[in-house]
Image (spheres, rainbow, N blue to C red):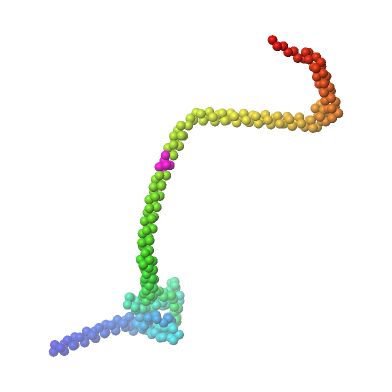
Amino acid sequence: MKRRDEISVGALVLVTAVLLFGGTLWIARGGLSRGYEMYAKFPWGAGLKVGQPVLLAGVNIGFVSDVDLDPNGTLLVKMSIKKDYKIPINTTATVAANGIFGDQLIALTPVKPTTESLPEKDTIPTGISAPGLADLMAKGDSITKNVNVLTASLRSELVDSSGIKDIRVAIKDLSKVMAQLTTVVAHQDKELTATQGQVREKIAAIDMVKIDSTLANLRSASANADKLVKNLDSTRIAVNGLLNKVNNGDGSISMLLNDKGAMHSRINKILESLDSLVADIKKNPKKYINLRIF
């Protein structure tokens, strides 16, 4: 009797679970309202199967009712959409991950809100799918491989080839150079400070009164130089005027220079007078020279 009761209770629990699962599935698929059909095409490997949900802008509006495999590499997917929902004409269909266990769903994404909708049994254009878990795993594997290659290269260059030792030696040498530079900078700073002090002392020792006097003398000399330049200009102008008169034949000087006969006559008279004076001096020296010695 006890054994029979346990079997009855187990059977009742099993039937209840089946009814709950079936009812949930039936309600999720629209219950008595089967909705209308829409279609989409996806490449092989999309991971779609019957019963997976269809979301429009994040809202569950139906489910996948059939998946047909086309030999040309395409999955022909039929969707059952609730009659309460219309699909905008600018909508694209993509396959997205549903959870972390590899399940998939169809995401319908409108480009922008609109009141115009696609007709029933139409094919929804396929959009660009977001990377799924498999794609992310593949990317992770590729990154891991690259990291391993980089790690091996670093180990080969730094450990196997004594690269770390060379780096330590270079750092040590760089530390020595920096210490030497610090010493040089300190010495130069000391020398610069001393030079600045000497310059200040020289500046302080300068007699500003003498400098002012010297500047005044320079100004006076400059003024005198200006006057001299002006006088020279006046003299130049006068000489140029005189030369112009001589060249133009005005005056006795011009006549004397330009009249060769008159010039020779005058010179001869002067020479004759000099000869007469010399002869008279020789003849009567006492007349011209009177020399007494005590």
Where in the figure is residue 237, as x and y percent of width and height?
72, 31
| The stretch drawn in magenta includes residue 137 | no
Q: Quadrant of the N terminus?
A: bottom left
**What residue span does the magenta drawing correspond to?**
189-194
Q: Is residue 136 visible?
A: no
**Residue ID at (58%, 28%):** 220
Residue, far top: 294
Q: Examine the image and state in which quarter residue 12 appears.
A: bottom left
- Left or right: 94 with respect to 241? left
Where in the figure is residue 29, as x and y percent of width and height?
34, 82
Q: Quadrant of the C terminus?
A: top right
Where in the figure is residue 196, as x and y percent of width and height?
44, 39
Relative vertical location of residue 281 with respect to residue 104 in this rendering, above or below: above
Relative vertical location of residue 143 with respect to residue 191 in this rendering, above or below: below
Q: Nearer the viewer, residue 237 or 279?
A: 279
Where in the figure is residue 192, as x and y percent of width and height?
43, 42
Please state the total of marks drawn on the protein image: 0
Residue, far front: 293
Q: Is residue 265 visible?
A: yes
Relative vertical location of residue 209 with respect to residue 29 in this rendering, above or below: above
- Left or right: 248 with respect to 114? right
Q: Examine the image and state in which quarter residue 194 appears.
A: top left
**Residue ID at (22%, 84%):** 13
Q: Nearer the viewer, residue 85 or 127?
A: 127
Q: Examine the image and state in which quarter residue 96 appears.
A: bottom left
- Secondary structure character of the magenta stretch overall: helix
Relative vertical location of residue 246 with respect to residue 287 in this rendering, above or below: below
| The stretch drawn in magenta includes residue 190 | yes
Q: Nearer the viewer, residue 132 or 118?
A: 132
**Residue ID at (42%, 42%):** 191
**Residue ID at (60%, 31%):** 222
